[in-house]
Amino acid sequence: MEETRRTQVVIIGAGPSGLLLGQLLHRHGIDHVILESRSADYVLGRVRAGVLEQPTIAALREAGVGDRAEQEGLRMNGFDLRWDEESCHIDFSRIGKHATVYGQTRVTRDLMDARVACGGITLYEAGDVQPHDLESSRPYVTYRHEGRQWRMDCDFIAGCDGFHGVSRQSIPKSALQEYALTFPFGWLALLADVPPVSEEVAWINHADGFLMCSLRSRTRSRYYVQVPATEDIRHWDADKFWDLYRSRLPSDLAEKLVTGPALEMSIAPLRSYVCTTMRHGRLFLVGDAAHIVPPTGAKGLNLAVGDAKELADALRRHYLDHDTSDLDGYRDRALARIWKAVRFSWWMTNLTHKMTDNPFARQMQLAEFEYTRSSEAAQIAIAENFCGLETA
Ligand code: APR
């Protein structure tokens, strides 16, 4: 038999979007419950993004979880663009900004700790989560938990359940507007406890394909290399990764490369995707549920945080000031920010990856690199996009 509960906002998904939205709603005194299909350990085990923009840190601080990111995160003052044996340094100080290197797993852990401390309810391993009656003023969500069937009545549903989640799939096809571009390649990633080969994060364009040197700390490195989209992770091990990686590194970095056992290896497809139907009735989409960017611009987590902050502010205005205008404007405000980040991520992908076998395409990339190296304006354009554009 089904049992019924009630809350103001049901949040589906306990990734960074759902957890941050939950903390912000808690601060605003808005009653809510998070439903997550996986276990907390599974969610924490997912290794993903690692660069936080300043507004992202500010949003974490507002949620009461910014301290560790600020104290333990590494300040990122710029990065290197490299091609062949050439390079151009993008210096964020030219625009008076910086970013922070702090892994998404740590953001997730900080948010989970804060949630436990404030007694927020997260129902992990919730099965068959399904939103209903989105277009009515009384939506609800059904789910299974610990062997029992539940119905949660609410005012609003926040779909924070990632690209494969149920929330977006609950919107009728006729109402969905989607834009997508899938790149014919992915990133093979390896995480290892070895000192980073480069102090600055480096985006490297090699004639045979992209590679990236990034870091999580002074002793933990995260490296990526472009592979065909059809590549299977089961055909890779750490030795094979290091051989390919070293073969594409510029010689000064290849000499310094320290290898070691893989803590984690994965292949991520590269795609750009935006569902502009970010609101349907009483359902709001947040984060990866509404958009995916290739990781090249380090925007995914920052976009998710921006959405969660915007929706939390709009819900606060609705509940505390009885003003729905921010909820009505959520989609348009979010999309104005999202499309610019989607453009930058797409552009960085085109600049740094082997896009086709046509040598003309590579000549265009080389010309763009040379132009960037010679133009302060071009470097500033990259820096301001990377650090996060001001919202209107
Ligand atoms: N019911 C409940 N929970 C679900 C369901 C479902 N049907 N489907 C998915 N989920 C959960 C997933 O298990 C996951 O924990 O929703 C959560 C979504 O989390 P993320 O995929 O991390 O998405 P989001 O919180 O928006 O975070 C965006 O992730 O991909 C990166 O670069 C991206 O850093 C960004 C971040």
Image (cartoon, helix red, strand yellow):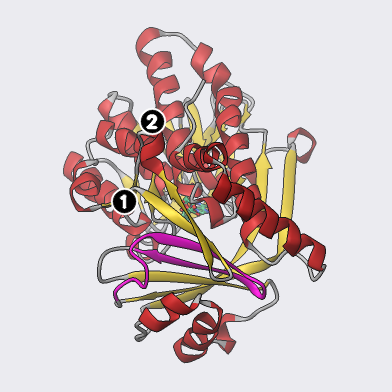
Q: Is residue 207 magenta?
A: yes
Amino acid identity at mark 1: Val
Q: Position of residue 132 (x, y in %)?
A: 59, 37
Task: State the residue lying farthest toward the front.
Answer: 374
Left or right for 235, reference 386: right
Q: Which residue is mark 2?
A: 7
Instruction: Kindly indicate the quadrant of the structure image that contains residue 27.
Output: top left
User: Is residue 44 among the parts visible in the rendering?
Assistant: yes
Q: Between residues 16 and 221, which one lies in front from this camera angle?
A: 221
Task: State the residue lying farthest toward the bottom.
Answer: 239
Element class at badge 2: loop
Of the numbered discs 1 and 2, the one sitting upstream in the chain is 2
Left or right for 267, reference 45: right
Q: Position of residue 389 (x, y in %)?
A: 49, 32
Q: Between residues 239 and 325, which one lies in front from this camera angle?
A: 239
133 versus 151 height, above or below:
above
Q: Is residue 31 magenta?
A: no
164 versus 187 height, above or below:
above
Magenta: predominant secondary structure element? strand
Residue 107, disc: 1
Per the model, the C-alpha gap separating discs 1 and 2 is 26 Å
User: Is residue 159 among the parts visible in the rendering?
Assistant: no
Give, as a single range, the part of the protein colored magenta: 195-215
Q: Residue drawn 43% across and 40% down?
A: 387
Q: Position of residue 219 (x, y in %)?
A: 25, 71
Q: Residue drawn 68% across and 71% down?
A: 229
Amino acid identity at mark 2: Thr
